[in-house]
Amino acid sequence: MIEFSIMNFKKGYSLSALVIGLAVLFVSVSRAGVEILAQENNDIRVRIEPIELTIYHKDGTTEPVVYRVPEVNTLSNNPFYGFKKLRDYLWLMFSQGNLNKAKVSLLLADKKISEAIELIKNNNTKLALEAGSEALDKLKYADTQLNQVDDSELEKKDVFNMMYHAGYAYKEVMVSMENEFEIDKEKLNQIIEELDQFNEQKKQEKEAMEAE
């Protein structure tokens, strides 16, 4: 009986040590991922067909935009998607400073809109809407973080411009879902309306910046 208990203890200890070891490894990889993201934020947005659109201004001018989003391999209907969400959470948690948090959150938002695109291709409108809604939430969080960055930061304007274009690109994706079969029109319209509000706010901020 004593030997059996000792064996069980050893097995439990070994399992606990393995779980802790894997957790430490996962955190380490996630922290390394944050450093990589900070350096390659633009480079990884070139792997799938870009979102092309035109922004119309009140003075009659137009602004053609080619917005690139990253490729995604694991979608929310994948049984291992939970690990991806945990990794994303750790990426954001370990990001240092408001500017980096804004950049990482914007990248995660881009990944979510990529998921929405792929889910629509797979005729999974429910999950596509959820991905679109999450993309908007992460975009808003990125905006919140960027607003806390000092204007003297050289990269702030670049991140703002990406965020400005992102809002219009996300709307382009969501509007493309309007004719999808059995889509929740009410939820879709709510997302589009919130994107319109976000885009109008960013447009006003951009015009104010350019007028200075």
Image (cartoon, helix red, strand yellow):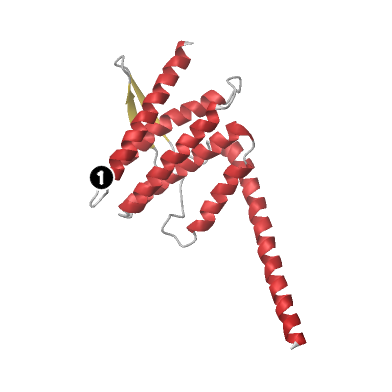
As displayed, is residue 1 above or below residue 25? Answer: below
- Quadrant, the N terminus: bottom right
As displayed, is residue 31 above or below residue 51? Answer: below
How far across and how far down the image is residue 146, in percent?
54, 29
The outermost residue toward the front is 1
Neighbour class for label 1 at 10 Å: few (<14), some, many (≥20)? some
Which residue appears at 52% of the width and 36% of the height? 42
Q: Is residue 161 left or right of residue 38?
A: left
Q: Secondary structure at mark 1?
A: helix
Which residue appears at 33% of the width and 52% of the height? 126
Query: In this orientation, which residue lies closer to the viewer: 185 or 180?
Result: 185
In which quadrant of the rendered view does residue 36 lie? top right
Q: Is residue 122 left or right of residue 1?
A: left
In which quadrant of the rendered view does residue 203 lie? top left
How far across and how far down the image is residue 80, in percent?
49, 61
**Residue 3 visible to the viewer:** yes
The outermost residue toward the bottom is 1
Instruction: Residue under label 1, please give it.
Output: 185
As displayed, is residue 85 above or below residue 151? Answer: below
As displayed, is residue 151 above or below residue 20? Answer: above
Which residue appears at 74% of the width and 76% of the height? 10
Q: Give the residue type that dot 1 points to.
A: Lys
**Residue 172 visible to the viewer:** no
Query: In this orientation, which residue lies closer to the viewer: 72 or 20?
Result: 20
Query: In this orientation, which residue lies closer to the viewer: 15 or 164?
Result: 15
How far across and how far down the image is residue 93, in percent?
60, 44
Which residue appears at 66% of the width and 61% of the height? 22
How far across and how far down the image is residue 106, in percent?
50, 37
